[in-house]
Amino acid sequence: MNDWFKGRAWCRGMIAAAQILKEKNGCIMMISVGRQSFVVLVTTAFAFLLFASAALADPVTPTTVTAGTSPTLTINSSGFFDLSKVTSKQISISPASGVSNLQLSNATPASATVTFTLSSSAPAGARMLVINTGDVNVSLKFTVQANSNKCTPSNCRLPRFCDENDKCVQPLVCNPRCHSPQVCVKKSGGGNVCETPQ
């Protein structure tokens, strides 16, 4: 019975140590115990602590990405947290605004590559790359910076406007002028023509 209490206290110490390590590099780690046995809890806590120790260097690189691009992030583990068993369905980015096509590839026990697309309107600020395998939940911090080339009213003055591709363009002009409901559109062979939207 004494050994059981000592083991339980040791496990709490390991988890506390992991909690201390997380504060140093934006790496948040949690263990979901649920109905797992004490042996599994101790093993998971030990592996988690080693992952946290390795993550203190560069748990995710780069740490800053730009809106309007398709970033590639590399995540690293000591190998005790086996990244080769992680699937794309077990990763997410929070908050997810502006994020699409999230994929995980080139996974080995020690590293993996995460790719995704960031819209040009993706909000700047801190994000979390989350790995959730059920028993282990790891959140790695990175930052999204605004796209300096994004088309906005401040850098695209009238009569120009921002089109659907986020480019500052001149409005089309037809001669003679179009009358509503017709609009001026660009012909494939060159020149502009009035057409009624379908």
Image (cartoon, helix red, strand yellow):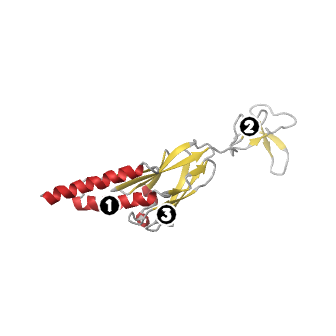
Which residue is rendered at x = 38% and y = 65% of the image?
A: 80
Query: Which residue in the structure is indicated by mark 1?
Result: 46
Amino acid type indicated by mark 2: Asn
Earlier-in-chain disc, 2 versus 3: 3
Task: Answer whether residue 69 is visible to the viewer in this image.
Answer: yes
Dividing the image into 4 quarters, which one contains the C terminus?
top right
Nearer the observer, disc 1 or disc 2? 1
Give SS at disc 1. helix
Residue 27: image x %, image y %? 44, 52
Which is more toward the observer, 103 or 182?
A: 103
Which residue is rendered at x = 85% and y = 49% of the image?
A: 190
**Numbered label attached to residue 141:** none
Residue farthest to the left, as pictured = 1
Amino acid type indicated by mark 3: Ala
For mark 2, does the 10 Å Cα neighbourhood hold few (<14), some (14 to 19), or many (20 or more) residues? few
Pointer 1 and pointer 3: residues touching (CB < 8 Å)? no
Residue 61: image x %, image y %? 54, 57
Query: Which residue in the structure is indicated by mark 3?
Result: 112
Earlier-in-chain disc, 1 versus 3: 1
Q: CA distance from mark 1 to mark 3?
A: 21 Å
Nearer the observer, disc 1 or disc 3? 1
Q: CA distance from mark 2 to mark 3?
A: 39 Å
Q: CA distance from mark 1 to mark 2?
A: 53 Å
Which residue is rendered at x = 51% and y = 67% of the image?
A: 106
Query: Which residue in the structure is indicated by mark 2?
Result: 155
Give SS at disc 2. loop
